[in-house]
Amino acid sequence: MLAAIEAGGTKFVCAVGDHQFNIIDRTSFPTTYPEETMAKIIGFFDAYDEIEAMGIGSFGPIGINQHASNYGYITSTPKVKWRNYNFLGEMKKHYQFPIGWTTDVNAACLGEYHLGSGKDKHSCIYLTVGTGVGGGAIFNGRFIEGFGHAEMGHIILRNHSADPFQGVCPYHGNCLEGLASGPAIEKRVGVKAEELDKNHQVWEMIGHYLAQALLNYTLILRPERIILGGGVMNQSKVLTCVKKEFALMLAGYVDTPEVDEYIVLPSLGNNAGITGGLILAHQLL
């Protein structure tokens, strides 16, 4: 039996599954403070004696360098109670089986790479656009990371010509997350993204910003597929705008697959992250 945790900034999902990555049981609960959340995690997994390994995908930033003192920590998160919290260390106090550790978006990328929209490709990028913006990249089965994990949501962009908004990111202002996340949309127009009409002009701006980002990722990494997930992508017009703007910005400079095959939605839906956690666990055995 395999175990997985999808540790999100607003919600935790815990699950157990088999070696074919079928989910046997799962639970979810709001992300509160560490002590309360950890008690719920332990309470769920203690009911299963057969667990062989676990994979954790966590909100971040997190420490992933196994040689660094902060490996396994949630580090400079804006969630103050979780800042510099030794998540992996606390889990290892309770369990002796091997535990894999990565970002929540890396876990989703892993799930989609093996079983979802990237399963027939050697390389893919997964970008989630919601409360925050984050991305992961896998090439030939391995995450692209070095000193730390990717922070694809914090690349600096040029503002749309009709958008004077300076962004909501407390670190970088008009980075991708600062301009295109759910909170950025709400701050800009005064209405939550999910309540906006599909014809609102803001969607073209969001498509413009995402296309800028995807162009940069394409020129640097040249992946075979880019997968866009997260709540903002539930607005169907965004994907249409992204594809249109991306083609214009690329201007035929380098070859990519046809845009409808290159930029796609996830096929695992809300199960991408937890499925990726199960795969991460399986890889430890």
Image (tube, grey):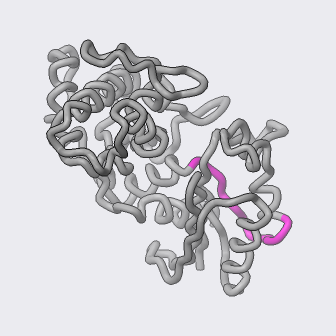
The residue segment tinted magenta is 93-103
**Residue for point 36% across, 26% down:** 213
Position of residue 47 relative to residue 137, above or below, is below
Residue depicted at x 60% and y 58%: 7
Residue at 32 percent across and 26 percent down: it is 209
Residue 87 screen position, x and y as percent: 75, 55
- Say if residue 135 shows up in the picture: yes
Who's the residue at 59% across and 26% down the image? 170
Q: Is residue 68 left or right of residue 138?
A: right
Q: Quadrant of the N terminus?
A: bottom right
| Number of numbered discs visible in the structure rendering | 0
Q: Is residue 235 above or below residue 170?
A: below
Q: Position of residue 129 (x, y in %)?
A: 40, 42
Is 130 or 213 nearer to us in this picture? Answer: 130
Counting from the top left corner in percent of width and height, residue 270 is at 40, 62
* Residue 264 falls within the magenta-colored stretch: no
Q: Is residue 16 above or below residue 109?
A: below
The image quadrant where one finds the C terminus is bottom right
Left or right, 103 with reference to 79: left
Q: Is residue 90 left or right of residue 148?
A: right
Residue 112 location (% of width, % of height): 38, 55
Camera-nearest residue between 138 and 58: 58
Name the one closer to the observer, 99 or 244: 244
Which image quadrant for residue 80? top right
Residue 197, by quadrant, is top left
